[in-house]
Image (cartoon, rainbow, N blue to C red):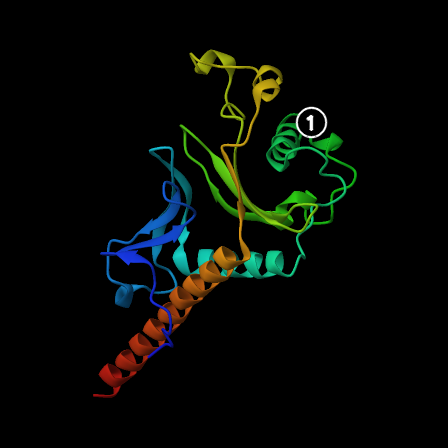
Amino acid sequence: MPNNRKILTMTKYEITFIINDKTKIIIPLKDPMEFLGPIYIEKILLIFNGHKALLSKTTIYHDMLHFSDLLKKALNQELFLHYSITLDIGYHHNEYLYIGVNNPKNLFTDNNDDGWNGYDYNLWSARNKLTSLDTWIYNASDGSIILEVTPIYPYLFSEPEEEPNYIPYEEWIKTYKPYFITTLSRETAEQWIEQAEQIIRMVEYNEKRMQYRSKIDVES
């Protein structure tokens, strides 16, 4: 069995990463932890101000690996923002996306070989028609750990005549603001790492158990 020396914060099959009394990140599993495998897909949601916002919907295993990795880097103060990110990271992200769609030859000259430097801080992404959000973890100038969720311009790939509520990007970006931003204590980051790694260990244990059973079935 995996080492579960700390108990996951769970209600029924819901895994919870607590931010404060009214705000949390949840993974509403449809199955018990014993059924989680490396390709198990589930939503990750932010509960904030009485609303639910989709942060990711990919494999939980890989989401937790990346979650743990970025939190560890932030604890070690390895995620100070690149010098080119002088405004809010979500503002820069929207500028990068908009330029990339409309004038790709003029993308930022300070990008690294893999694209915009800001993606080093990107935790999760969620795309849907109503709201598209990106989640980021980085260190503020004083070394504190920031968790931020930012919106993407909703009409990035739309034509004005196709959208009754269309707003030009130039107008939308003037009122841009983060969807959610908070500072995480070291204790919270450490607890979240432990929770994420418990999920990782459980998935890996489940996978080994299933491989063993398959081997027994083949040999019997």
Q: Place residue 140 in its image quadrant.
A: top right
Nearest the eye: 9 or 169: 9
Q: Which quarter of the rendered picture does the C terminus lie within?
A: bottom left
Using residue 97 as the reference point, say whether residue 30 is left or right of it.
left
Residue placed under numbered mark 1 in the picture: 103
Amino acid type at image mark 1 = Asn
164 shown above or below 220: above
Which residue is located at x 79 percent, y 38 percent?
Answer: 109
Nearest the eye: 47 or 129: 47
Where residue 123 sits in the image (x, y, percent)?
A: 53, 49
Using residue 134 as the reference point, say whether residue 111 is left or right of it.
right
Q: Secondary structure at mark 1?
A: loop
Using residue 40 as the reference point, say whether residue 100 is left or right of it.
right
Where residue 86 sits in the image (x, y, percent)?
A: 72, 35
Q: Which residue is at the far right? A: 109
Within 10 Å of the Cα at label 1, are there few (<14), some (14-19), or many (20+) other Cα atoms?
few
Which residue is located at x 26 percent, y 80 percent?
Answer: 213
